[in-house]
Image (spheres, rainbow, N blue to C red):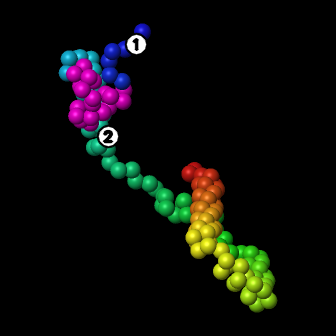
Amino acid sequence: MTSTHLSERDLQAAAESEALLPTPQADHLRGCRLCQDRVATYQHLFVATARLPQPAFTFDLTASVLAQLPRQKPAFPWMLGGVAALVLGVVVVFLLVFGGAVAQAFQSLPTPLLGTGLALVATLLVAGQGVELLARHRRQMRLLSFS
């Protein structure tokens, strides 16, 4: 058996404003005393809830949350910085030794191909950083406990 009355969601929407209801549900509400009574109940509930005082915590919620967050690690740990310096050194030596040949190879490439390749590499780097930031955020949120 299916009910012809408004759903709870529609009743709550009507309690906020009848204008939120689609026309068929609004027409039903105007003719159904049961649904009107249920909307009135929700309106009373909304008014009573709005009159409640704001909750006052007996503790500092911000300090409690911040105390549970793990300490930030440096963005580039020393080991990663050392590896980056080593790789940069190898690239500099390679360019010093083979710089002329590399320049000739890049001159033979069409300009749009080179620009597209650089844009693709930049996009991949930014996307990777975004994924890492999202993963770190999710790990930190799992560590929080509100006890």
Q: Which mark is residue 49?
A: 2
Q: Identify the residue at image location x=61%, y=69%.
A: 113
Q: Main secondary structure of the magenta part?
A: helix
Q: Position of residue 143 (x, y in %)?
A: 63, 55
Q: Quadrant of residue 25?
A: top left
Q: What span is colored magenta in the figure?
A: 8-29
Tell me: residue 62, above or below residue 30: below
Q: Identify the residue at image location x=59%, y=58%.
A: 134
Q: Give the spatial CA distance, label 1 vs label 2.
A: 32 Å
Tell me: residue 145, above or below residue 113: above
Lower sequence index among marks 1 and 2? 1
Q: Identify the residue at image location x=40%, y=13%.
A: 2
**Badge 1 amino acid:** Thr
Left/right placement of residue 93 relative to residue 134 reads right
Q: Which mark is residue 2?
A: 1
Q: Position of residue 88 (x, y in %)?
A: 74, 82
Residue at the extreme top of the image, as rendered = 1
Q: Quadrant of residue 27?
A: top left
Secondary structure at badge 2 equals helix
**Badge 2 amino acid:** Thr
Q: Nearer the viewer, residue 122 or 81?
A: 122
